[in-house]
Image (cartoon, rainbow, N blue to C red):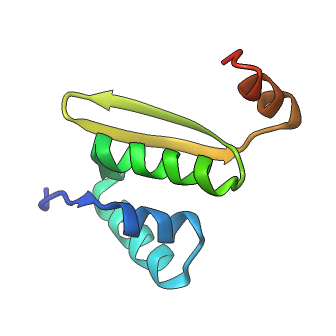
Amino acid sequence: MATQIILDTDILSAVMRKNPVAISKARHYLAEHGQFIFSVITRYEILRGLKANRMRLLLVAYAERGKMTRLISARQATRRERRQYEEGKN
C-alpha cells in the first residue's frame, strides 16, 4: 500500500467547493487509497468555516479510527435537519 497523506483544510475546502483540479486529484487519491484522511484540526476548521460563512449546512457522516477521521459522506441538510440543528436538537 502506498503512503497515505493527511489532507489539510485548503485541499478539503477545494474538494468541497468542487474545484475541478482538486476533484481530479481527489478521485485519483481515492482510487489508490479508498478514503480521505484528515486531522481533527482540519475537521474543526471546516465545520467552523461553514458555520462562520453561513454556507450550506451539511450532514456529515464520519468514523474516527484512532488518530484518523474517515469521511464517509456529506450532503446538504434538509430543512427539517437544519431546523433541528438550529434549535439544538441534534
Q: Is residue 51 above or below residue 27?
A: above
Give the farthest residue toward the right: 79
Q: Quick one: which residue is furthest to the bottom in this view?
A: 21
Q: Quadrant of the N terminus?
A: bottom left
Query: Residue drawn 55% across and 82% down?
Result: 20
Quarter where residue 16 is shown? bottom right
Q: Position of residue 21 (x, y in %)?
A: 47, 84
Is residue 67 toward the left or the right of residue 24 in the image? left
Q: Image point 59% across, 69% down: which residue? A: 17
Quadrant of the snapshot with the C terminus: top right
53 in relation to 15, above or below: above
Residue 41 on image: x %, y %:
30, 45
- Please provide percent x and percent y for residue 29: 33, 66
In the picture provided, is 45 more to the left or to the right than 18? Answer: left
Residue visible at 77% across and 21% down?
A: 87
Where is 37 relative to 20, above or below? above
**Residue at the spot 46% in from the left edge and 34% down from the top edge:** 62
The foreground one among 21 and 79 is 79
Q: Is residue 52 above or below residue 7?
A: above
- The answer to whether residue 67 is left or right of residue 42 is left
In this rendering, would 81 be left or right of 24? right
Q: Nearer the viewer, residue 60 or 43?
A: 43
The extreme front residue here reads 52
